[in-house]
Structures are given as C-alpha cells and as structure tokens.
Image: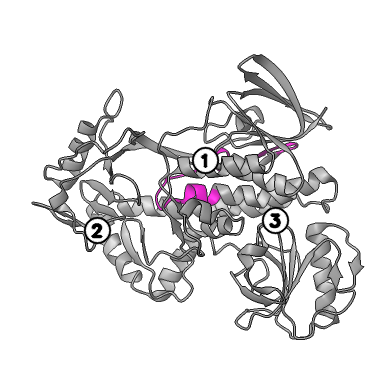
C-alpha cells in the first residue's frame, strides 16, 4: 500500500503540516527519531503573523489560555533598538510567550484529535523515489523497514537528512565569532522593578525587560515569561566557548563580563527542565529549492538564520500552512496545474526576506564605534511612524503579497485577509471562527448578495455584513490569503468572471451553482 504523505520530524512545523493535511482529508504518517516529545527548552515564544494564523485554526486559545483574539505587542526590538509600536493603528506584530515544548504538546494533541499517526522512535535513514512514489527507509525500535508514500516532507531541522538525501544544496554563510548563552535563573529580588519589569543593576544602570540590551562588550537580555523562571541571555564576540556542558556559573561569568559588574544568579525553582544552553557561531542558509520531485522541505530544513526577533517558528509554521492544502489537493487529484509549484514560489521569497532582516539586525548589534554611530542614526529613523510600520510588517511577515495570477487591482488581492467581524443570520462571528476547517471561503458582504451562477461550487459561502470591511466580497484561500476581492456593492460581470477564474486557478475546475 502506498501511503499519502510521510513527514520526517514531529517538531512544530511537521505537526502543523500534519494537522493541515488532515483537515483537507489526507492522512499523513509522522516519523520522529526521539522516543517521546522533547521537553528541552528552545524557543520562548511566537512572533508575528503566525499568531494570527494559529488563531484561525482554533489553536491560539489552547496556547495562550485566553478566550479572546490575539493582541499586538505595544513594543518590540529591532537590532537591539527599541521599537515603539503604539503609533500604529493596525499593529501587525503579535506575540505569544509560550515555550516551544508547549507548542509541540498542543500540536501533538491536535494532530491526534485529527487522527494523525505519529511514530516516535522511528527515524528516516534513507529515501528513494520514482514516478509513482517516494520510499522512506525507516529505522525503528524493531529494526529497519520501508515506507512508501505519494510524497515525503522533510521537517527535520537545519541538519535535515531529507534535504541531504534529495541532493538539495543549502548555500549560505557560517559565522563562528559569537557565543550565545541562555539560562533560566533568578536574579536578586531587590534589583527588580515590579512596576516596569526593568532590572536595576548596581554599578551599571537600568536594563529594560524583554529587550536586547547592547553595549560594546556584548548583548544582555532579561525577561520574565509568564509562569516561568526569569530568563537571562548573553551574546559575546570573539570569545571561545567553554568546553563541556553549560553551567549556571558560566552564565553568571558571561553576564558579568557583558555588564561589567557582578551579576549573581541562582537556580530557578522546581524540577525543570530548566534551560542552560550555549551556542557558538551561527548559520544563515536558504535551500536552493524547496522541492525535488516527490520530496518537499518545510521549516528549518529549508532555511536557517539568526534567532533575532524570533522569526524561526513564525516562518516555518507559515510554510506548513501554505503547503498543507496544496499538497492535499495534489494527492486528492483535484489540484489545478502548477498548484504545488506555488509553494516554493511563494514561501522561498518570504524566507529570503527573513534572512535579510535577521542579518541586518546582526549587523546592528555588532561591536565597534562605526556600528554605534549607525545605531544612533537608525534610532532616529525608528522615531518615524512610516519606518516603524515598514519594519513591523517585515518582522511580522505581513508585508508578504503573493502573486495570485490575476490582474485584479484590489489592494487586498494577494494579502493576508484582515480579521473581519461579520454579522450573519446566525449572529456575529469573527473570520477566525470561519477558517478553523481550512476550507476555501467566499465572504459575500454585498448589498443584495452575489447573483445566481457567480459562486463556484466547492467554495463555502458566508453571507453577512461587515460595515468596516475593506471589501464587499473576498475569496479566501485555506491559508487565509485573498485570491480575489471586490469593493463594489454590486460586482459587475467582469469582476464575477475574475472571481470564477481565481477559483479555478486555486481550487481546480469548478462548476457554478446558484448563490
């Protein structure tokens, strides 16, 4: 039997893809070399548009414990410079402070609810493919076996074996002149400012919370994530990393060097696991291509970069949400020509944008008087509202506009759909509640409803009113991007023809049925 999809890697990206495929009627098998879900602390939160995307799959509340919609952050950082987002009327930079282990746990639970088979302790060790299938060689607790599938997706991280076995190049740069250290640790209570969350360091001064604090000796970060021990992190340049496992004493010594005064640290409360991590150098790489015939890449398997600004999960989870519905249509046999190719043409440029801004931020935090002068000038630019808007969109990923293959002049076409609130016959509903099933949607907000024959079959139609909506009708893809839009209260024949063409391009040959 040939399976639908095999996914190598049960991290957040692989699990998110598995959920998306299941919502589209495809049953994936997820392989994970670890015998059980990892609990090692890694990323500390989600930043950007992916927070909204998780909301549109009903997962935000599970992760945040908050019944309401996501709220944007009033402040953030760019290159260790403060980014004041309060002047923005429509701030796109959402944040969700939740450990990566919790993200993995919630996505594992959701995947199992949807019937996904997850095989822990089963590792991809080889693959081959032909015109009919790709066959994974898997090593599990009972030995090695072969697992054929229509497609195989590598979600197996920056050192992806899937990518290597597929012969996909991974060009980029490696730097070895930095050492980053991070630990869960307590600092003296009298240093804490309960009102502002800032750290008052005797002999040094004030260190703001949740910000990369840069000086000529390095970078120091202090944060108090909800429900967790305080987090301390440093970055130093041109200093060899210590040998052996990371220790709290090593973390203390590094923090003291960066701030120039003694920084006493004590172990956090509880049994853990507690974070003690050292990273020497870093990689910035982007896969030459995202697909080799029946093999595809998502997340870190396709791109790695500096963690500045927390873009990793933002980018990787959006890869999975973009790929899921397209791959499912390919497997079901109802994908329009070239649909699967748009995964790379849409997501690889988005990854390149992240590479650009993370490398720019790395340059802004480097040591040296020239960099300090550049930072002074850049700080002036960040006082400009338009500059803040552009950087916020860049970091959030909300500046992405896909080519929808039409000449539609509407400004929403190709953009992520705004979070509308609709008044329908059954009550008030947010767009996020309508997208949980990941189906194509046509939002009909016109005065009299779209005419008979205008609505493509297979597209779910929601009729209602949204007085503040920037359009009167929107065709929304399963990943929440707008494939077609109109602002006319009565779309004309040309616009309706464009609607049918957009539906055909993204969802296959469709018949029309009465509205």
Q: Which residue is mark 2?
A: 197
Dot 1: element: helix
Tag 2 or tag 3, which sits nearer the N-term?
Answer: 2
Question: Looking at the image, can residue 393 be seen?
Answer: yes
Residue 310 colored in magenta in the image: yes
Q: Is residue 48 magenta?
A: no
Tell me which corner region of the image, top left, top right, bottom left or bottom right, holds residue 178: top left
The dot on residue 105 is 1
Judge left or right: residue 155 versus residue 128: left
Q: Position of residue 159 (x, y in %)?
A: 53, 31
Q: Considering the image in quadrants, where does the C terminus appear?
A: bottom right
Along the line of sight, which residue is nearer the eye, 100 or 385?
100
The residue that appears at 54% across and 44% down in the rendered structure is: 106
Whole-angstrom CA distance, mark 3 to mark 1, is: 20 Å
Secondary structure beneath disc 3?
Answer: loop
Q: Which residue is drawn at the image coordinates 59% and 33% (left, top)?
A: 9
The reply to whether the C-beta atoms of the residues labelled 3 and 2 are less than 8 Å apart is no
Judge left or right: residue 437 versus residue 285: right
Quadrant in which the N terminus is drawn:
top right
Residue furthest out toward the top: 143
Residue 235 at what x, y percent from top left?
Answer: 29, 43
Q: Is residue 48 left or right of residue 328?
A: left
Q: Quadrant of residue 410?
A: bottom right
Residue 54, image x and y in percent?
A: 56, 55
Packing grade of label 3 (10 A; few <14, some 14-19, many >=20) is: some
| SS label for mark 2 | loop
Q: Which residues are magenta?
A: 292-315
The residue wearing badge 3 is 437
């Amino acid at each position: 039997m040939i399976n639908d999809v095999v996914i190598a890697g049960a991290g957040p990206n692989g699990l998110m893809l598995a959920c998306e495929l299941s919502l589209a009627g495809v049953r994936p098998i997820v392989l994970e070399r670890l015998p059980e879900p990892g609990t090692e602390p890694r990323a500390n939160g989600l930043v950007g548009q992916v927070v909204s995307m998780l909301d549109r799959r009903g997962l935000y509340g599970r992760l945040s414990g908050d019944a309401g919609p996501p709220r944007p952050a009033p402040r953030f950082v760019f290159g260790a410079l403060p980014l004041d987002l309060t002047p923005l009327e429509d701030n796109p930079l959402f944040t969700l402070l939740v450990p990566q282990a919790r993200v993995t746990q919630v996505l594992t639970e959701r995947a199992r609810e949807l019937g996904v088979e997850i095989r822990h302790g089963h590792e991809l060790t080889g693959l081959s493919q032909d015109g009919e299938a790709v066959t994974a060689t898997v090593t599990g607790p009972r030995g090695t076996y072969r697992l054929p599938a229509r497609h195989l997706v590598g979600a197996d991280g920056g050192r992806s074996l899937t990518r290597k076995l597929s012969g996909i190049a991974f060009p980029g740069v490696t730097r070895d002149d930095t050492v980053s250290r991070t630990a869960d640790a307590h600092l003296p209570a009298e240093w804490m400012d309960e009102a502002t969350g800032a750290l008052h360091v005797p002999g040094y001064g004030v260190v703001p919370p949740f910000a990369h604090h840069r000086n000529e000796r390095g970078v120091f970060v202090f944060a108090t994530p909800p429900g967790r021990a305080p987090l301390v992190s440093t970055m130093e340049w041109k200093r060899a990393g210590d040998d052996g496992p990371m220790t709290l004493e090593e973390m203390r010594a590094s923090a003291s060097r960066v701030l120039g005064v003694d920084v006493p640290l004590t172990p956090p409360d509880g049994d853990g696991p507690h974070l003690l991590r050292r990273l020497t150098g870093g990689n910035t790489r982007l896969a030459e291509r995202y697909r080799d015939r029946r093999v595809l890449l998502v997340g870190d398997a396709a791109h790695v970069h500096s963690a500045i600004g927390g873009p990793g999960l933002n980018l990787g989870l959006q890869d999975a949400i973009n790929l899921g519905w397209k791959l499912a249509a390919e497997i079901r046999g109802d994908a329009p020509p070239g649909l699967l190719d748009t995964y790379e043409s849409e997501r690889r440029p988005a990854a390149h944008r992240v590479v650009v801004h993370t490398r720019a931020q790395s340059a802004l935090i480097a040591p040296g008087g020239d960099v300090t002068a550049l930072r002074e000038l850049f700080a002036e630019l960040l006082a400009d509202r338009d500059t803040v808007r552009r950087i916020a969109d860049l970091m959030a990923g909300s500046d992405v506009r896909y080519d929808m293959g039409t000449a539609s002049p509407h400004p929403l076409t190709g953009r992520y759909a705004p979070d509308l609130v609709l008044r329908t016959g059954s009550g008030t509903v947010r767009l996020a509640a309508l997208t949980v099933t990941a189906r194509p949607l046509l939002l009909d907000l016109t005065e009299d409803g779209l005419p008979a024959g205008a609505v493509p079959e297979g597209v779910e139609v929601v009729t209602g009113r949204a007085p503040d909506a920037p359009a009167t009708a929107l065709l929304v893809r399963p990943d929440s991007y707008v494939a077609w839009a109109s602002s006319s209260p009565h779309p004309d024949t040309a616009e309706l023809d464009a609607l049918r063409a957009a539906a055909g391009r993204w969802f296959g040959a469709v018949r029309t049925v009465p509205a």
